Structures are given as structure tokens and as C-alpha cells.
Amino acid sequence: MKAIEIREFGGLDVLTYADVPVPSPGPGQVLVRVRAAGVGPWDAWVREGRSVLPQPLPLVPGSDLSGIVEAIGPGVSGFSLGQAVYGVTNARFTGAYAEFAIAEAGMIAPKPVQLSDAEAASAPVIATTAWQMLFDHAGLKSGQRVLVLGGGGNVGAYAVRLAAWAGSEVVATASAGDTDFVKSLGARATIDARGGGLSGLAGPFDIVIDTVGEPMLAQSSVLLRPGGAVISAVAMPDKSLAAQHHLRAEFILVAVDASGLTRLAALFDDGTLRPRVGEILPLSAARTAHEMLAGRPHKPGKIVLLPGM
């Protein structure tokens, strides 16, 4: 099969479009014929050797996928051959940039019926991250005020939509070009924080969802009411600053599982959530995708690779 293989850690040149053997599923695993694979910043961390988890070489990068169940390993129930699924490959976030990929059965679920494969592959990590930040870590309740830092980004957009859906008043930072998009997701107001930071924003807020890091992460602490929560997916909040303002501060690592994916699939299918796909590229153009991760101009939204393109 064709796959993107990494034989050594490094820059773009280590991404090799190669022929590799089709893997076989072991206990608790499913072999997926990949129809689409999402591209995220964590893929670049793996490529560069900066993953927090051990990454034996050679490896195939990529975690998000959508595709068809091709084979089922021992001990797996609830899936059938030919079934359309989506989710992530494994806890190391590797294996999806290929025509076939092994996925842990507990990390995939039936694909949302209303989504294309490209749309479905764009969603698992970022939508799950937003859900877990809001509900599992911040404990969001209806009527609370939520500030989303980076509301126009991939995770931030889902956080805005989910918080509004849950009955919260949402304010988000967003560039001028993303203002209309973020407001369409349910944000009551937006602020372009690139110039003056958050100085013009009136609190207090119950929750801050951070997808951008410093310096806005630290600035946001003074906008929270005592007992509020600041949850970041990109940086560890300053614990001393949080204690000074009597806040709960957490940094999260996403944990994708079948139950969460099933819940999100229902929200995609009923129209509550809408994916935002950016560039769609052939699998062989993985280097171009990683150039986009590094700053090469591209359409807003999640980058997706298609093995059959």
C-alpha cells in the first residue's frame, strides 16, 4: 500500500511517499481502508521527534481518519466489515497517512451519516478537545459566561459552537476576517486581540477556553470571577497567578474514545455541529500539508489528505 513513512525525525524531507506492507489488526484493533486522513500540528511534533510519547521508527504519521472497516481483530465487537467509521488510530497518534491503517477499536465509532469522509476525518481530535475542555474539565453549565481565546481556530470554533449550544453567553477573540464566521457559531461578541490584547474586554467570565497560549492566557485570568476556570489545550496556565485570583487552572491532553465520538456524531448529524474543512490534498502531498502547518498560506479550516485522490 502507499503511505507516508518517516524513517528519521526531522524536517519536511523526512516525509517519504512509499510502498509499505498492509498491517494486520491485533487484539482490540480494526483495519481501516482510509478514505481521508486529517492533518494536525501534533503530526509535525511527531515528525520532528517532539512527541511526549515514545515513537519507534520507522512510522507512519497521522491520527484522524475516516474510512471503511476492512478487517477485525480478535476480541472486537460492535463493528462489521464494510462499515463506515471515523476516529483516531491510537494513543501515539500515528498510522493514518496511508491507504490502510490500524485503529484501536475503542477510539473509533460509526461515521456521521451527514458528513463526507473529508469532513469526518477533520473532526475527531479537535471536536473532542473542545468538548472535553468545556464539559469534562471546566464543568460548563447553562447561563455561564465563556471567553474563547482563538475562536476562529479549529478547536476554538468548536468550543464557541458547543458553548453556545449549551446555553452559555460566548465571547471570543478572532481576527477581523473571522468575525462573521465566529458570530455565526453563536458568539455574542468578538474582539480582535492582536493589537491591544484583552484590555478592552469587560468581565467577569466563568470560564476561559484557551487555544492560543501566552500572552492572552495570562491576561485572561483577571477577567475571571473568583472560582472560575481557565482551561488550556496549548500551554500550562500559571498556577501561582491562578491561585492569586482564586481560579482553577488546567492544561489538558485530549483523550479520544468511542463514546465521545458517538455523541459528537449525533451533533453532526442533527446539524448542531458543522465541520470546517480547509485544504484537501492527495496523500502524496503530505509535505505540502506540513508546509501549511508551518505557515504556508492555505484556506481556513482543517487540512485533509485523501489517499484515493
Image (spheres, rainbow, N blue to C red):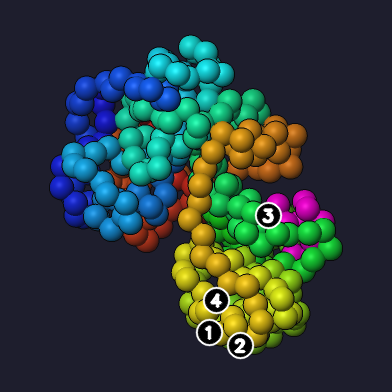
Please state which amino acid type lies under the numbered disc 3: Phe
Q: Nearer the viewer, residue 202 or 28?
A: 28
Q: Residue furthest front?
A: 75
| Residue at the disc numbered 2 | 244
Q: Could you give the CA–CA distance between mark 2 and mark 4, rounded to whole angstroms?
A: 15 Å
Labelled disc at residue 240? 1
> Where 193 sits versus 272, above or below?
below
Start-end of magenta stretch: 160-171
Q: Nearer the viewer, mark 3 or mark 2?
A: 2
Q: Is residue 180 left or right of residue 93?
A: right
Identify the residue at horizontal 65%, vertical 85% (top origin): 245
Q: Could you give the CA–CA distance between mark 1 and mark 4, rounded to whole angstroms?
A: 13 Å
- Whole-percent x, y for residue 136 in the image: 64, 54
Labelled disc at residue 135? 3
- Whole-percent x, y for residue 46 in the image: 30, 51
Residue 189, by quadrant, is bottom right
Please state which amino acid type lies under the numbered disc 4: Leu
- Tag 4 secondary structure: helix
Please state which amino acid type lies under the numbered disc 2: Gln
Q: Nearer the viewer, mark 2 or mark 4?
A: 2
Q: Nearer the viewer, mark 1 or mark 4?
A: 1
Q: Is residue 100 visible?
A: yes
> Residue 163 lies in magenta, yes or no?
yes
Are the residues at dot 3 and dot 4 in contact (C-beta closer than 8 Å)?
Answer: no
Q: Could you give the CA–CA distance between mark 2 and mark 1, rounded to whole angstroms?
A: 6 Å
Are the residues at dot 2 and dot 1 in contact (C-beta closer than 8 Å)?
Answer: yes
Mark before the other along the chain sequence, 2 or 4: 4
Q: Nearer the viewer, mark 3 or mark 1?
A: 1
